[in-house]
Image (spheres, rainbow, N blue to C red):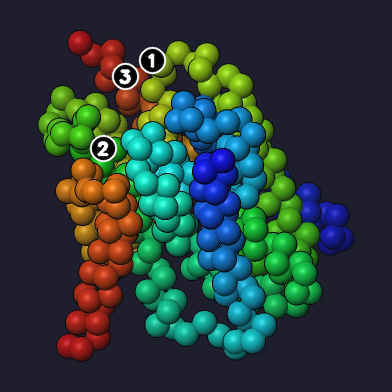
């Protein structure tokens, strides 16, 4: 297949995820404006941070007056999972030029990663760059459009729709498949439990502490398993 | 102004995470299996930390009961996520259950 066809295939394969992606951007835009971001700031954040979960965590902390350093740090900690995607997709990007690899990195998130790697493992001949950029373009454009729409129309949505609940549901859809064995189950249990207990933690460090506790507990469990 | 710093710091930090192994693998032959394993514990830990408080807390107070609509909707959505691994179906069913429960007096 030509590069052009592979690009279009990437866009096309990403389609089923877009109905979830657009409201994600919308909720980010709407929540950010309420928390005190300007429209330009939050669209810039969506364009550069480009990660709904981390942006919402940051917006939430900002709204509850957390120190700005904790806000930024939490956003980064929530995105720690991208390091794993980076490791898993890196072999597929080996033959790209350095410059393209640096560009591709910016668009790495749950959907572009999952869809691209599935396709790359199924199909030797797919043009890595063209297909990946197709998935990236589809997610990026719709996410930014969603953010802009959230900024513009966010305050006109009836509150009764409880759209904010779509966000934990999205996380849930990512969380459940990430639990595949004993250590990952321990990571989720400890991470979730600590987050609930630490909800009033000083400086809103709850999510950071919870995430690190979950990972540490999982490492301990898997090390003990190896030692037996 | 300070909000721009937050955006900048979060963006730079996030890009560093994304580019980490993509840039390294030019020099490194493979990701050390130990590193890979530890990294695989990050999504369940962080995602659970984001989800669970939203479900079991109501105004920062523990609310584990049948009267908590979000907990029920989340539990059913979790089953859908497990059976289908479909993002859209999970969100749709979860929102649907939440709306249905809000109609129950």
Q: Nearer the viewer, residue B45 or A79?
A: A79
- Identify the subunit bearing mark 3: B
Label 2 sits on a secondary structure element that is helix
Q: In the rendered view, tell whether residue B37 sits above or below residue B80.
A: below
Q: Position of residue A201 (x, y in %)?
A: 22, 48
Give the left or right position of residue B64, taking residue A137 as reference. left
Q: Residue at x 72, y 48 (%)?
A: A137
Label 1 sits on a secondary structure element that is helix
Give the left or right position of residue A20, taking residue A106 as reference. left
Residue at mark 2: B55
Q: Residue at x 48, y 30 (%)?
A: A36
Quadrant where the C terminus of chain A is found in the figure? bottom left
Q: Nearer the viewer, residue B76 or B30?
A: B30
Q: Nearer the viewer, mark 3 or mark 1?
A: 1
Give how far apart the Cα atoms at labels 3 and 2 are: 17 Å
Rate crowding at label 1 as few (under 14), some (14 to 19) or many (20 or more) other CA atoms within 10 Å: few
Give the left or right position of residue B47, taking residue B1 as reference. left
Label 3 sits on a secondary structure element that is helix
Quadrant where the N terminus of chain A is found in the figure? bottom right
Residue at mark 1: A160
Q: Position of residue A183 (x, y in %)?
A: 27, 69
Q: Residue at x 62, y 50 (%)?
A: A48
Give how far apart the Cα atoms at labels 3 and 1 are: 13 Å
Give how far apart the Cα atoms at labels 2 and 1 are: 18 Å
- Identify the subunit bearing mark 2: B
Q: Nearer the viewer, residue A34 or A115?
A: A34
Residue at mark 3: B100
Q: Nearer the viewer, mark 3 or mark 2?
A: 2
Rate crowding at label 3 as few (under 14), some (14 to 19) or many (20 or more) other CA atoms within 10 Å: few
Q: Residue at x 45, y 30 (%)?
A: A35
């Amino acid at each position: 297949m030509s590069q052009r066809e592979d690009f279009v295939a990437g866009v096309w394969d990403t389609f089923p995820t877009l109905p979830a992606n657009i409201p994600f951007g919308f909720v980010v835009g709407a929540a950010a404006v309420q928390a005190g971001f300007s429209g330009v700031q939050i669209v810039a954040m969506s364009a550069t941070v480009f990660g709904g979960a981390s942006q919402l965590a940051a917006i939430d902390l900002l709204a509850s007056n957390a120190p700005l350093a904790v806000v930024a740090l939490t956003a980064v900690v929530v995105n720690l999972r991208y390091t794993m995607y980076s490791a898993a997709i890196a072999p597929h990007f080996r033959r790209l030029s350095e410059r393209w690899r640096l560009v591709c990195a910016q668009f790495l998130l749950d959907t572009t990663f999952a869809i691209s790697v599935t396709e790359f493992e199924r199909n030797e001949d797919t043009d890595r760059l063209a297909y990946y950029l197709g998935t990236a373009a589809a997610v990026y454009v719709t996410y930014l459009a969603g953010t802009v729409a959230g900024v513009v129309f966010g305050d006109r949505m009836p509150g009764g729709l409880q759209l904010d609940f779509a966000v934990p549901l999205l996380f849930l859809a990512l969380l459940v498949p990430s639990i595949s064995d004993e250590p990952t189950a321990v990571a989720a249990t400890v991470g979730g439990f600590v987050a609930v207990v630490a909800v009033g933690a000083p400086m809103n460090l709850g999510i950071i502490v919870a995430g690190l506790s979950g990972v540490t507990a999982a490492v301990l469990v898997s090390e003990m398993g190896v030692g037996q | 102004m300070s909000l721009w710093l937050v955006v900048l710091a979060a963006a730079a930090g996030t890009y560093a995470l994304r580019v980490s192994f993509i840039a390294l693998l030019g020099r490194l032959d493979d990701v050390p299996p130990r590193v890979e394993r530890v990294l695989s514990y990050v999504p369940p830990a962080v995602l659970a930390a984001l989800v669970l408080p939203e479900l079991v807390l109501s105004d920062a107070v523990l609310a584990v009961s049948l009267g908590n609509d979000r907990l029920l909707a989340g539990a059913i959505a979790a089953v859908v996520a497990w059976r289908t691994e479909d993002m859209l179906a999970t969100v749709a069913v979860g929102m649907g259950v939440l709306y249905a429960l809000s109609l129950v007096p």
